[in-house]
């Protein structure tokens, strides 16, 4: 009963506030990391920051790039987003801009390179890393090289570089200078990218040792640099994207184990979770800012699961309650994500007082309601009383599992595929076949009993 009152008090009496968010000042130079494989999770992260930068009136956006490449579809979305933005974007390659990274760099106004860095090699490959068939590869290269040539030309880069990055069958020649021979993909070092041909840089506007020097070379305010890191959900989405193959493997194994086990259990839940992460994990990035609410919802789920499915398993209820209290408390603490997570008494005193008042007030209010509300006729039907008539009796044998032994026979109650129920000695028993589907009404024989696992076979 105490757990029930605490549960109701938390749900009804408390509304979590939203923590303060990092502010981007007008004229700020916003630095956003683009690290690891290019994926939809990164697209959602960049889109969120770009929207905030536009709203705040930021002067520029710098992509701090270190990527081996990634999804071509996502690359196209990022390029379109950068091209449409009112905030001018710059790229700082530190240390890699491979494949998709090189194409994204062409969508920014200027590219700067770290002293030891490289950019290029953007030939399309399959998601597994294998080569694409000749015909399909030719179609992809033909279309996207044309698309990215227009992007490069619009931003003042040599459009021939795109052919060198993507197409093995073309020689890259700028003026009278052969940049890359036919039969090889173009990859430029920092020094090669910054090389001038006919008074114009081949690709990079300069070499810079850090972001401050990038800002200075680009004519931006170095003292206005604001570096933003992915939030909690965005970090999870990036991790999920990296671990996608493992989620797929775990989902398949869990599905197999669930298929071979009677009923629906832990293996099925884990399988469903892994497949959900595989197919939709990158969308978690779009939930950024809701981390505290998510912890509260997860804690609430633990309490509900304990109350409905596992009554008496106190660990779930205590964990869920602790998560809800922690989420509510943390939501009232005024902190900025960019600051180190440190607490002082002044920071937590007010939230602690609010939390205490809300819990005590809610428990008192619910106690009074539970005491006096049943006396009102309109609410009387909502409460059980000692005079409520008992329901119809059910034979006790229905709930008792008989001692099942090998060799006994029974009738299939629900189709075994391969798990289901059979009727033995007027009681329903969970069983599993050896893999075959057995229709309801068929007669089966118990061939083995090991703990709760009963294996049966169809009697021919």
Image: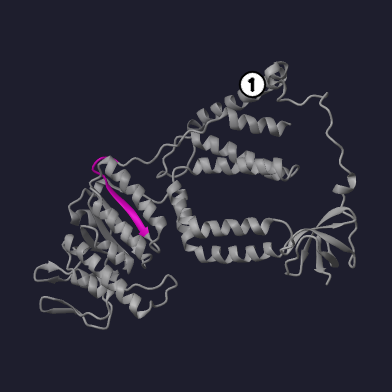
287 relative to 27 in the view: left or right: right
In the rendered view, tell whether residue 291 sits above or below residue 207.
above
From the viewer's side, name the closer residue of 59 and 211: 59
Residue 87 in percent (x, y) is at 24, 48
In the structure shown, which secondary structural element does the residue marked by tag 1 occupy? helix
Quadrant location, the N terminus: top right
Farthest residue to the front: give it: 441
In the rendered view, tell whether residue 212 sits above or below residue 58.
below
Let me know if residue 212 appears in the view.
no
> Which residue is at a point 31% across and 45% down the rendered structure image?
51
> Where is mark 1, residue-wise?
365
Residue 323 in percent (x, y) is at 59, 41
112 relative to 12 in the view: left or right: left
Q: In this picture, which residue range is highlighted in magenta?
A: 25-34
Let me know if residue 128 appears in the view.
yes
> Which residue is at a point 47% across and 51% down the rendered structure image?
284
Residue 288 in percent (x, y) is at 44, 46
Category of crowding for the residue at label 1, using alpha-carbon neighbours closer than 10 angstroms: few (below 14), some (14–19), many (at least 20): some
Query: Is residue 456 within the magenta segment?
Result: no
Query: Is residue 28 within the magenta segment?
Result: yes
Q: Magenta span: helix, strand or loop, mainly? A: strand
Farthest residue to the left: give it: 198
140 relative to 456 in the view: left or right: left
Quadrant location, the C terminus: bottom right
Residue 316 in percent (x, y) is at 68, 45
């Amino acid at each position: 009963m105490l757990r029930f009152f605490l549960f109701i008090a938390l749900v009804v009496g408390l509304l979590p506030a939203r923590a303060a968010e990092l502010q981007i000042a007008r004229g700020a130079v916003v630095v956003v990391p683009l690290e690891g494989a290019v994926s939809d999770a990164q697209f959602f992260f960049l889109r969120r920051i770009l929207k905030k930068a536009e709203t705040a009136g930021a002067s520029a956006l710098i992509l701090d790039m270190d990527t081996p490449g990634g999804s071509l579809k996502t690359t196209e979305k990022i390029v379109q987003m950068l091209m449409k933005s009112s905030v001018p974007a710059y790229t700082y390659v530190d240390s890699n801009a491979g494949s998709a990274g090189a194409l994204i760099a062409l969508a920014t106004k200027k590219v700067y390179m770290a002293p030891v860095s490289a950019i290029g090699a953007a030939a399309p490959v399959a998601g597994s890393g294998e080569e694409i068939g000749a015909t399909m590869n030719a179609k992809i290269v033909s279309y996207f090289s044309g698309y990215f040539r227009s992007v490069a030309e619009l931003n003042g880069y040599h459009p021939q570089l795109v052919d060198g990055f993507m197409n093995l069958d073309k020689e890259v020649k700028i003026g009278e200078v052969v940049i890359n021979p036919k039969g090889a993909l173009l990859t430029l070092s920092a020094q090669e990218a910054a090389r001038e041909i006919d008074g114009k840089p081949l690709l990079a506007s300069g070499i810079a040792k850090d972001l401050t020097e990038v800002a200075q070379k680009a004519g931006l305010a170095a003292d206005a640099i604001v570096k933003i890191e992915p939030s909690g959900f965005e970090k999870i989405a990036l991790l999920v994207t990296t671990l996608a193959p493992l989620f797929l493997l775990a989902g398949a194994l869990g599905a197999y184990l669930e298929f071979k086990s009677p009923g629906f259990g832990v293996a099925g839940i884990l399988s469903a979770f892994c497949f959900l992460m595989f197919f939709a994990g990158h969308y978690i990035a779009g939930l950024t800012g809701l981390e505290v609410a998510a912890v509260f919802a997860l804690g609430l789920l633990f309490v509900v699961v304990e109350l409905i499915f596992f009554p008496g398993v106190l660990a779930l209820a205590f964990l869920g309650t602790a998560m809800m209290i922690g989420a509510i408390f943390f939501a009232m603490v005024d902190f900025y994500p960019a600051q180190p997570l440190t607490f002082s008494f002044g920071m937590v005193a007010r939230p602690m007082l609010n939390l205490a008042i809300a819990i005590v007030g809610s428990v008192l209010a619910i106690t009074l309601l539970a005491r006096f509300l049943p006396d009102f006729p309109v609410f009387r039907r909502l409460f059980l009383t000692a005079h409520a008539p008992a329901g119809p009796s059910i034979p006790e044998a229905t709930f008792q599992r008989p001692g099942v032994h090998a060799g006994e026979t029974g009738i299939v109650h629900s189709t075994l595929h391969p798990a289901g129920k059979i009727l033995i000695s007027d009681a329903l028993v969970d069983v599993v076949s050896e893999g075959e589907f057995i229709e309801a009404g068929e007669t089966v024989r118990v061939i083995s009993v090991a703990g709760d696992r009963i294996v049966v076979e169809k009697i021919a």
